[in-house]
Amino acid sequence: MKTFCGRANPTTGAIEWLEEDENYDYHQEIARSRYADMLHDKDRNTKYYQGIRAAVSRVKERGEKAVVLDIGTGTGLLSMMAAAAGADFCYAIEVFKPMANAAVKIVEKNGFRDRIKVINKHSTEVTVGPDGDMQCRANILVTELFDTELIGEGALPSYEHAHKYLVQEGCEAVPHRATVYVQLVESKRMWSWNKLFPVRVETENGEKIIVSPPEMESCPGVPSVCDIQLNQMPSSDFTILSDVVTMFSVDFSKPVRSASTCYRVQLEPVKSGKAQIVLSWWDIDMDPSGKINCTMAPYWVKSTSALQWRDHWMQCVYFLPNEEPVLQGEKVCLTACRDEYSLWYKLQKDREEENKADDRVESPVCRCQAHLLWNRPRFGELNDQNRTHQYISALMKVLKMDSVCLCISDGSLLPMLAHCLGAKQVHSKCVYPSSTDLYHPNEFFKANNLEEKIKIIETRPESLTSSQLEDKKISVLVGEPFFTTSLLPWHNLYFWYARTAVNSHLTSDVTVLPQAASLHMMIVEFQDLWRIRSPCGICEGFDVRTMDDMISNSLNFRESKEAEPHPLWEYPCKSLSDPQEVLTFDFRKTVPHHCLSTEGSVNLLRKGRSHGAVLWMEYHLAAGISINTGLMRISNEKGNCEWNPHCKQAVYFFSSVIESETLTDLPSVVNYAISFDTKTGEIAMDFKL
C-alpha cells in the first residue's frame, strides 16, 4: 500500500507530493536509530551484564524467585542477560512494534522463548494480575531509558509508574542509581553558540559596529540542552572555574518522583572569571555498592585510556541566562531545576538569594525569537570573525556607490554589512524566503538605526514584484547562502533556484555573490563513527543478527543510497585520499534544465579502512575569496582532518561498513559517479571500492 506525503524540497523550495510506502516512517526511524551504537558500546553492555548478574544473585540468596521487568527492551539484550544469569522469568516491554517483533525473534533464536515474554506496549499501559500482561509484580527492575541529559527520554515518569504498579517494594534495580555532575567554565567558543557578539566593520568612514537588539542581549535562550562530544573540545577552548561537584542523584530501587523540583549546591571558584557555561554529565552505578560504574565523564576528569566512545550518551552544555563574574574563593550557589524531561541552571551570588530555597527558577524562554531561528552552530557561524571578514572583503570588491543590493538568505547579517560598506547610496533589500523564519530582522535593523535604510520584502522569490523593488533593477545579488531548512550541504543551493526565480529583476551585468559553488569529496577512515552503521552480530554472547538484518533492510529501503549529515569536528577521521572537486554550480547563470553529472576515480594515498566519503560545499564569493563548509586542513602526515565547526558535512557510508565486509586487499582506488538532478535538487551518488 502506498501513501502520499507532502514535503518542502529544501533545495528547490518547491512543495512536493511524493508517493511513499506505508512503512516509510518506521524504516526511516530504524535506519537512523542508534541501536548499533548501543550494541557496540562494550563498556555499557559489560557493566549492565555484571549488574544484572549481581542483582539476580542477591534475590536468589534471599530464597526468592527472580522476576525481571525490563522497560524499553529494544533487542531484548538485557532480558537475555537476566535469563542467562538465572532469572526465573522476564517481562520485556517495548512500545515500538517493529522493534518488539525483532525482540521476539531474537529471544527465540537465543533459546529464551519460555523465560522471556515480550510485551508490545508502553510500560504505563502494562497490567499485572492473573489476566494481565504480567502475572505478578517484578522484584528486579532493569531499564535503559537514558539519553545524554539522563531524563530526556522520560525515564522519571516511567520509573515513577513502575514503582507504583509494576514492581515490588524494595526491589533490586539495574542500574541502582544515577548521579549528575556539573562543572562551571568560561568559554568564548561555547558562549558564541548562544549570544551574538558585536560585528566590527572597517569602512572608508571609519569603524562601524553592528550590535544585537537589547532583547537578544538579555534573552536567556532556549531550554533545550546542547549535547556534544565534549571529548573533542580542546582544553584551550575553555577555562575551568570550579571543581566537579555532584548536582543530584536518583536511587532507582526506591519510588521515584517525576514532579518538577530544584537542587542547589555551593561552589567555590578555583579561578576568577566569567561564569558562562555549566558542563554536565552523569554516571550510573549498576549495584548498591557503586563498584560497577559506567561513566560519561570527559577526558580531563577520567584518564583517556579508559574512555569508551559512544554516540548515544555524550555530555551536556548548559548556557547560564547571563554571564556572571566570579572571584576565586568567593562562594556562589548553583541551582539546577528540572521538569519531567529537561534541566536548566542558574548561578546566584547573594547569600540572600541563596537562602530562598523554595524559589523556583523558571525554565528559560526565548524572548528574542532568534534562538528559535538559529541553532547553536549558526550562532557560532555568525560570530566567526574570520568568516565575516571574508564576506566584508568580497562585498568591498563588488559594491559601488549606486549599487542596488538584494539579499536572499535566512536571518543574515549581510544586508547590514552591505549598507555599512556602501554608505547611504546602497539600497539593500532582503527577501526572507523560508516559512520557518521566525525571527524578524527589523529589530536588528532598529538596534543599528537602519530600519529606514533597509527594506524587508517578505515574499517568496518567485512572487517578487517590481513594485516591491520600487521599480529598480538589482545590480548586486548576495546570499551567504544559509537557509534554516537545509540539512545536507547542497540544500543551500536553494540560493541558485531563488536567483533563477528573480532573474527578471536583475540587471544584465548583475554581480552575484557568491558567484559559484563547488562540491568537494574525500575518502576517509573514521576513528569511531563507523560503529553507528556497522552490524553487531554477537553481543555479549547473544546472537542479535536479526537486528542487523532489520537495520540493513531499512537502510536498503532508501537510506543506504543517501548521505547523512554529521558535524565532523566531533568525530575524528583521517583522510585516505586528497580532497577532490567533483561538481561546480555557476550562480551567475540560471539553473540549467539538464542534470549535472560527473564520474571518475580517487587514488587512496594512505592505508586504512575506507569507511566512506565525506562531501561538502565551497562558496566562491569573489575572485580569490571563498568560504569552505567542510575540510579546513589535513593537520599532519597521518591524515588527521580539521573540519569547519559550524557546519554539518555529508557522510556517505560504504557498503563495506554497512555489511561488515572483510576486504582481504585494501583498495587503492575508489570509483565514483555523482549527479545533481536540477529538477528535484537531489544529488545521487555511487561508489565502488
Image: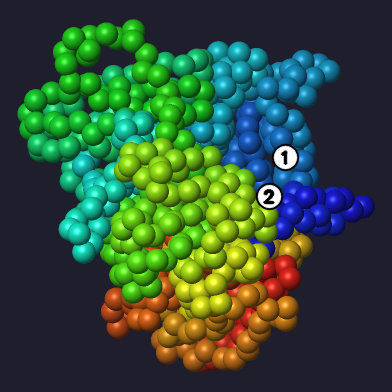
Residue shown at the point (23%, 34%) measured from the top left? 323
Q: Tell me if I can see residue 228 in this picture.
A: no
* Precedes in sequence: disc 2 or disc 1: 2
Query: Is there CB contact under 8 Å for labels 2 and 1?
Result: yes
Q: Secondary structure at mark 1?
A: loop
Q: Percent x, y for residue 98?
A: 76, 46
Q: Percent x, y for residue 333?
A: 22, 21
Marks 2 and 1 sit apart, C-alpha to C-alpha, by 10 Å
Examine the image and state in which quarter residue 624 appears: bottom left
Residue shown at the point (50%, 53%) measured from the top left? 430
Q: Secondary structure at mark 2?
A: helix
Above or below, 174 against 338 in this view is below
Q: Percent x, y for residue 204?
A: 21, 64
The residue pinned by badge 2 equals 29
Of 678 and 418, the residue lying toward us? 418
Above or below, 289 against 395 in this view is above
Residue shown at the point (81%, 16%) measured from the top left? 130
Examine the image and state in which quarter residue 560 appears: bottom right
Q: Give the residue type at disc 1.
A: Phe
The residue pinned by badge 1 equals 96
Of 47 and 689, the residue lying toward us? 689
